[in-house]
Image: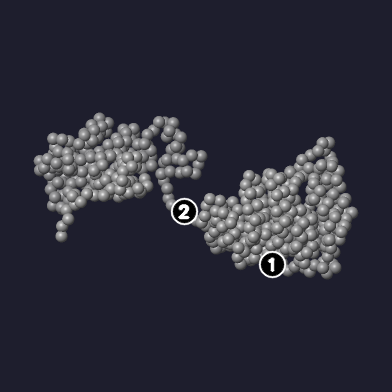
Amino acid sequence: MASGQLFSRTTQALFYNYKQLPIQRMLDFDFLCGRETPSVAGIINPGSEGFQKLFFGQEEIAVPVHSAIEAACAAHPTADVFINFASFRSAAASSMAALKQPTIRVVAIIAEGVPESDTKQLIAFARANNKVVIGPATVGGIQAGAFRIGDTAGTIDNIIECKLYRPGSVGFVSKSGGMSNEMYNTIARVTDGIYEGIAIGGDVFPGSTLSDHVLRFNNIPQIKMMVVLGELGGRDEYSLVEALKQGKINKPVVAWVSGTCARLFKSEVQFGHAGAKSGGEMESAQAKNQALRDAGAVVPTSYEAFEAVIKETFEKLVEDGQICPIKEVEPPQIPEDLNTAIKSGKVRAPTHIISTISDDRGEEPCYAGVPMSSIVEQGLGVGDVISLLWFKRSLPRYCTKFIEICIMLCADHGPCVSGAHNTIVTARAGKDLVSCLVSGLLTIGPRFGGAIDDAARYFKDAYDRGLTPYEFVESMKKKGIRVPGIGHRIKRGDNRDKRVELLQLFARTNFPSVKYMEYAVQVETYTLSKANNLVLNVDGAIGSLFLDLLAGSGMFTKPEIDEIVGIGYLNGLFVLARSIGLIGHTFDQKRLKQPLYRHPWEDVLYTK
């Protein structure tokens, strides 16, 4: 491995398996360091493509998302680092696929639990092709002031505290990601800080070793001393011992192998990492520390003394003129996310939507404050749900039953009416369900099914002003307006609409008052004297009876009733009901596998 520097201020990475927080932390680090370009060139998320919005400082950027490793590498040929956040189940396969790409030079594998046999194959391939694997079971690595892998070094506050926003003179390598964070802080307190830090991971077979990185650090001119934190178990530290003995390292190495407390236990102890288990005296922390000391490394007597020997070694290098003091720079302020600022009480922001009918923020959705489970447990029906979501209150059972009857009676009126016809033609054109439904709904208006609101509006106005049926009808005639809710193409005075009769019967039996309906019936009596087809139709019946429901229930004020009629609530009933039928016609045509509809010539009058 050896060679030198892995990263720079222009290094870019491909991030595998989208995780918003680690990517955003990388971009925040870029901004903190004053990079001109984001370190994340692209995201690989199997099965999806497009863009992900993230922040680069105060600017929002769109990072490309690719569905395959090969496509991402082709699209971003300068991105030579592959950061793998896949689970242990797929980490090996995706890492091997990345290593096989000619553009990828470094692969960082975050997952723990990658099978050892798979890891060995990755190591062999990487070494044969002069590539670097960091991990598995790693937090990654960082080059101060230049490039960061994922969550390395933790929060931005910790990075600033550890002075990682600018390069220092110390190269650091450890097995533990958690202890790396601790050591970055320690090193920043007693030296000018880290130049590069790597956590190789705690598995038995890491993709790269402690000595791999120490030898690499030895070739980087900016690194003046190395700090190594090993652990009991395995023999990785002995390769560093051999390198020291052979004179391959000519810079000071300060090292400590943790796990000396293992001897206090009567039986063998497995520490946190898979590799942190002593398999004999040579793998003990004491033996490794002594071997490193004998080979020329600076090894303290305990972990508590580690900081002091790091400081002493650094100060000697400064004294000898090998390290020049670094001029401190003030890092830029990372813009705080709006949500974080709001929670901390630093800012207030206006909302963009107001909702009063439902709330999904708790354990379960609520309709007008009523939990969904309560609706089911009480055995409430569709009418009750409509009363909560449309009227924001629980209406009496006779009201919700009336709503349900209206829906049942208006669900369909055969295939010949305009809405159903449009839906059938669209379905036979092979369109999807939503397109078929919408094509039918778009025909609803003043001439088809959309007269309920107008019927209610005109009947209410006439009744409230005390107009007689004669005065009402004749005034409408003078204005050139047909009376909404009156008239039918088929039904007559001697052949009434059964739906109207059922609605009237229910209302007379259950409603406290039917004054508006009775007024509509009086209007019908007058219009029938003029023509036998000017009967009260279902729009007029529902419109007048809904006025009685609103007024008679005692749950609505007069302004509220006027608003309900004005907004279009009543036509909403017809739209909701007829959607059932239109969906039925769509399924019917698709089930019957009907061909594309073409209107017959003989049914068209061609004229000049």
Colour setup of the view: one colour
- Image position, residue 54 (x, y; %): 55, 58
Say if 501 sits above or below 158 in the image: above
Q: Which amino acid does the dot numbered 2 rest on?
A: Thr
Q: Which residue is at 22% across, 36% downward?
A: 500
Few, some or many residues within 10 Å of mark 2 (<14, 14–19, 20+): few
Residue 568, how many percent across, how many down?
A: 30, 47
Residue at 74% x, 44% y is 274
Residue in the image at 42% along x and 34% along y: 375
Q: Position of residue 431 (x, y in %)?
A: 35, 48
Instruction: Specify whether 322 is left or right of 487.
Output: right
Q: Which residue is mark 1?
A: 329
Corner quadrant of residue 14: bottom right
**Amino acid bearing label 1:** Val
Residue 351, label in figure: 2
Q: Quadrant of residue 525?
A: top left
Would you say residue 443 is visible in this rendering? yes
Q: Farthest residue to the left: give it.
A: 529
Farthest residue, direction right: 294
